């Protein structure tokens, strides 16, 4: 799944927008399948490990939906992930991104501010958000909301 997303950004870097879109579509298919499997496993036996795996799978699905411009779906998948595990900053960030890009700036700002200073991907939340914004801009997402959040986070 992440391999497909990495491939998508590599293809974008080479100017292959069609190939990037295909790779992102494959990433979404894989994430959907993984979330369905994890949900089924959790429903059969609700162990802490099964819940953690389902939360991660829904978080990955939310990211794939975000990158594929399926913002309402990304919001729902993020919310499902957070109901299972409210800890991962990356899920909160993806939810904030989906809110921001679907013109729900107040909800987005609240999440970005609530997680300022958290750790995400081994570094500060703020830096990870800036990296995410760079990726989103490569996919054609942009707008005054992103610039406003960058200022809000001190960059």
Image (spheres, rainbow, N blue to C red):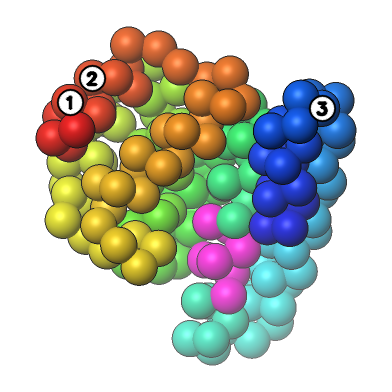
Residue at image coords 53%, 86%: 49
Residue in the image at 76% along x and 69% along y: 37
Q: Position of residue 91 (x, y in %)?
A: 42, 53
On the picture, is 79 further left or further right than 61?
left
- Real-space Cα separation, disc 3 to disc 1, in angstroms: 32 Å
Q: Position of residue 8 (x, y in %)?
A: 74, 41
User: Which of disc 3 and disc 2 is earlier in sequence?
Assistant: 3
- Is residue 58 in the magenta section? yes
Evaluate whether residue 24 shows in this view.
no
Q: Earlier in the sequence, mark 3 or mark 1?
A: 3
Mark 2, residue position = 148
Q: Which residues are magenta?
A: 53-59
User: Looking at the picture, does residue 4 appear above or below residue 9?
Assistant: below
Pick whichever, 84 or 111, lies toward us: 111
Task: Report if residue 75 is visible in the image.
Answer: yes
Nearer the observer, disc 3 or disc 1?
Answer: 3
Q: Which SS class for mark 2?
A: helix
| Residue position marked by numbered label 1 in the rendering | 151
> Is residue 8 shown above or below 141?
below
Figure quadrant of the N terminus: bottom right
* Farthest residue, direction top: 144
| Residue 12 magenta-highlighted | no
On screen, residue 31 versus residue 76, left or right, reads right
Residue identifier under label 3: 16
Q: Main secondary structure of the magenta part?
A: helix
């Amino acid at each position: 799944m992440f391999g497909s997303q990495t491939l998508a950004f590599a293809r974008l870097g080479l100017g292959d927008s069609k190939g990037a879109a295909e790779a992102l579509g494959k990433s979404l298919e894989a994430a959907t399948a993984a979330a369905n499997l994890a949900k089924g496993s959790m429903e059969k036996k609700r162990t802490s490990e099964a819940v953690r795996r389902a939360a991660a799978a829904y978080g990955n699905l939310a990211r794939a939906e975000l990158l594929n411009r399926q913002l309402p779906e990304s919001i729902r998948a993020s919310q499902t992930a957070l109901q299972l595990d409210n800890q991962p900053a990356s899920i909160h960030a993806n939810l904030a991104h989906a809110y921001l890009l679907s013109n729900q700036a107040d909800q987005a700002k609240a999440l970005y501010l609530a997680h300022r200073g958290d750790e995400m991907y081994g570094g500060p939340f703020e830096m990870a958000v800036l990296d995410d914004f760079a990726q989103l801009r490569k996919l054609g997402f942009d707008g005054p909301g992103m610039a406003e959040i960058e200022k809000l986070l001190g960059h």
